[in-house]
Amino acid sequence: MVDILAASNSRRTIDTLAESNGHHDPFAASNGDHESPKQLEITENELWLLSYYRESELAGSLLMGRLARETDDDDLRVRLTEHCAEEARHAWAWTETILKVGGMPKRVSETYQSRYHAAVGNPSNLLEVLALTQIFERRVVRHFRAHLSWPD
Ligand SMILES: [Fe+2]
């Protein structure tokens, strides 16, 4: 059983978690603990974009987690908790990607969600949040596919 509180407060515990999951220490390559520091292998603009993707996944995870805590619907609570965990995994995948190319995640205030809210306004109830999430999840796959075809 993983001690989540300890994991959030202890770098050593995070290292232990990574090793137990069969991952090498993603921090080692970027902070010089075990080898020389890596040079940033992408542009600053690309680092911002990866950080934006990471921040958006985190925002999605936090939103799903908040809704999971607030809902009175037992089935929805399970589904929202699963979605919360999935988005957190995505945020970690972006974090690992950033570290692997020699970067550190940037603080980014803009997210997919903030752009959606700017375009369509804040959802006024849970149903609107779920509908927006459904649309968003379909569109984001198209966005990432399109991004793959962007010129370097
Ligand atoms: Fe995601």
Image: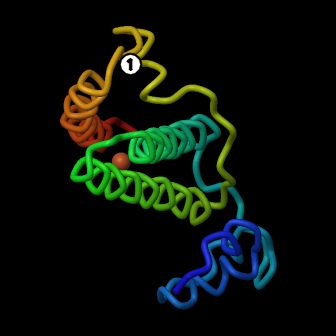
- Which residue occupies 58% across, 60% down? 101
Residue 32 lies left or right of residue 75; in this view the side is: right
Q: How are the colours assigned in the image?
A: rainbow
Q: In the picture shown, does residue 71 fall above or below 2?
A: above
Report the number of discs.
1
Residue appearing at x 58%, y 83% in the figure: 17
Q: Quadrant of residue 67?
A: top left
Is 41 on the left-hand or right-hand side of 83? right
Q: What crowding class fits label 1: few (fewer than 14 Cα within 10 Å), some (14-19), or many (20 or more)?
A: few
State whether residue 110 is above or below residue 102.
above
Position of residue 139 relative to residue 72, above or below, is: above
Instruction: Please state which of residues 124 and 92 is positioned toward the viewer in this rendering.
Output: 124
Mark 1 highlights which residue?
116
What x and y, as percent, mark residue 121? 39, 9
At x 46%, y 61%, the residue is 93
Q: Residue at x 51, y 60 (%)?
A: 92
Q: Position of residue 110 (x, y in %)?
A: 56, 26
| Picture quarter with the C terminus | top left
Residue 90, relative to residue 44: is it above or below?
below
Q: Nearer the viewer, residue 122 or 116?
A: 122
The amino acid on which the numbered mark 1 sits, given as a three-letter code, is: Tyr
